Amino acid sequence: MRFSFSPRRFLAVLRKEFHHIMRDPTTLMLIFIMPIFMIILFGFAVSGEIRNVPTVVLDLNRVQAHHEHFDRDITFSDALVHAFDNSQYFNVLYRVETREEMDQIIREGRAQVAVIIPANYSARFNEAQVMDMDRVRVYIDGADPAIARIAAEASTTIVYRFSVQSLDALTQIVGNMTIHPTTAERGAVFSTVLNNPALRQRQFLVPAIIAVIVFSIIIVLTSSTIVREKERGTIEQLMITPMTKTEFMLGKLSPYLVVGFFDILLILGLAYFLFGISAVGSIGLFITLGMLFVFCALGLGILISTFSSNQGQAIMLAIVFIIPSLILCGIIAPVSTMPGMVQFLANLLPLTHFMEITRGIIISGLGASYLSTHIWALSIFAVAVIVVSILKFKKSLD
C-alpha cells in the first residue's frame, strides 16, 4: 500500500505539537529561560581568569614595630602588602600577627595564599647582601593546581617588580654612594606549595568528580521515582492503604540511601586502585558527610518528582538543576574568583559545600571542626528540602 505525503496532515501534527509546547510551562522554561540563564551564568562564573585569590598576610616587620618600644621602619613591608592587594590576582582579606593564625586560615580554606614578610624586611632592604631569613615567603594551597600555578607566578612577579621599582627609587634618592643588593637577590621569593605539592591535576579532579557522580546519580534516580508511580497508576492504590504519605516518602527514599552509600564506597575504591588517590583525612568522616550530602540530593530529586508529570520531564528538570550546580561548585572555575552575586548563588547549592568537604578531607586531611560551616550548610539544606518535598507531595495528592 502506497502513502503520499500530505501537507495538510503534516501541518495538523505540527500545530498540535506547537500547541502542546506552548501549554507546557516546563518546556517553555527550557526553551526561553534556560538559554538566557545559562549564558549569563557561564559568562560571569566561567571567565577562565584567576583573580582576587583570597590571601592572608603575616607582616612580621609591622608586628615587631607594633610590639617594640622604639620605631622600626615598615615603609617597604607596608608598600609590598599594598602591591599584593592592588594586583588583580590577590585579595588580602586577612592580616594576622602569628604563624598559628595564618596556618588556621589556610587550613580552613578561608585563604589560598599566605605571604610572610620577614621582621627586618624594611630595615635591611638596602643592604648589599640579602640573607635567606630576609626574603619574602609565599605559601600556596595546592588543592587547586590552576590557582596554585597562577598564584606562584604572580607572587614572584609582584615581589620582583616591587624590588626593581623600590631599588631604582633608592638609587635616585641616595645616589651611587650606597651599595644596593641586586634586583635578583632582593626580588627572590621562597614559594612553598601545601597540599598536593606536585600540583597533580588528577589529585584535584578525582575528589571533585566523586561529589559530582554521587550528586548526578542520586538526583536523576530519585527525580523519577514518584512520577513512575503516577504513570503506572499505582500511587492512588498505595494511598488508599493504611500507609501514610510520610511513610510512603521515607520508603521511597531509603533504597537510594543504600545506593548512595554503595556509590561512595565504589568511587573511593576506584580512585585508590586506578589513580592511587587515598584520603589524607578520615574515611569515616567522609562517608558520614557523604551520606548527609546524599540526603540533600534525595530531597532535591523527590522535590523535582513532585513538580513533574512524567519521567521525561523529571529528568529534564534534574538536568536543569545539575548543570548550574556543576558550573558553580568550583570544579570548572574557583568559587573564590567569581563575582560576589555568583558566589552567593554558589553557596546556596549543596554540591558547592560537599566539594569543599571532599577536597578538605581527601586532599588536606581536615577534621570536622574545620569543615563546620559546610556541614551546617548541608544539614540545613537537607532538612529544609526534605520537609518541603513531603509537604509538596501531600499537597499534590490532596
Image: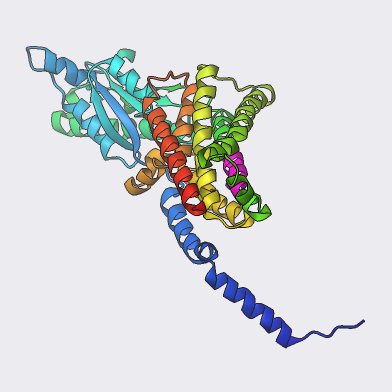
- Magenta stretch, residue numbers: 212-226
Magenta-colored stretch includes residue 40: no
Majority secondary structure of the magenta segment?
helix
Tally the numbered discs: 0
Magenta-colored stretch includes residue 217: yes
* Direction from residue 98 to residue 139 in the image, left or right: right
- Residue 103, located in which quarter of the rendered image? top left
Q: Could you say where residue 234 lies in the image, as x and y percent from the top left?
A: 66, 50
Q: Could you say where residue 232 lies in the image, as x and y percent from the top left?
A: 68, 53
Query: Residue at coordinates 61% horizontally, 49% vertically from top-left?
Result: 235
**Does residue 38 appear in this view?**
yes
**Which residue is nearer to you in this view: 218 or 342?**
218
Q: What colour-coding does the image apply?
A: rainbow
Q: Could you say where residue 271 lies in the image, as x and y percent from the top left?
A: 64, 26
Query: Residue at coordinates 49% horizontally, 22% vertically from top-left?
Result: 361
Q: Quadrant of the N terminus?
A: bottom right
Q: Could you say where residue 225 lies in the image, as x and y percent from the top left?
A: 62, 45
**Which residue is nearer to you in this view: 128 or 30?**
30
- Residue 183, located in which quarter of the rendered image? top left
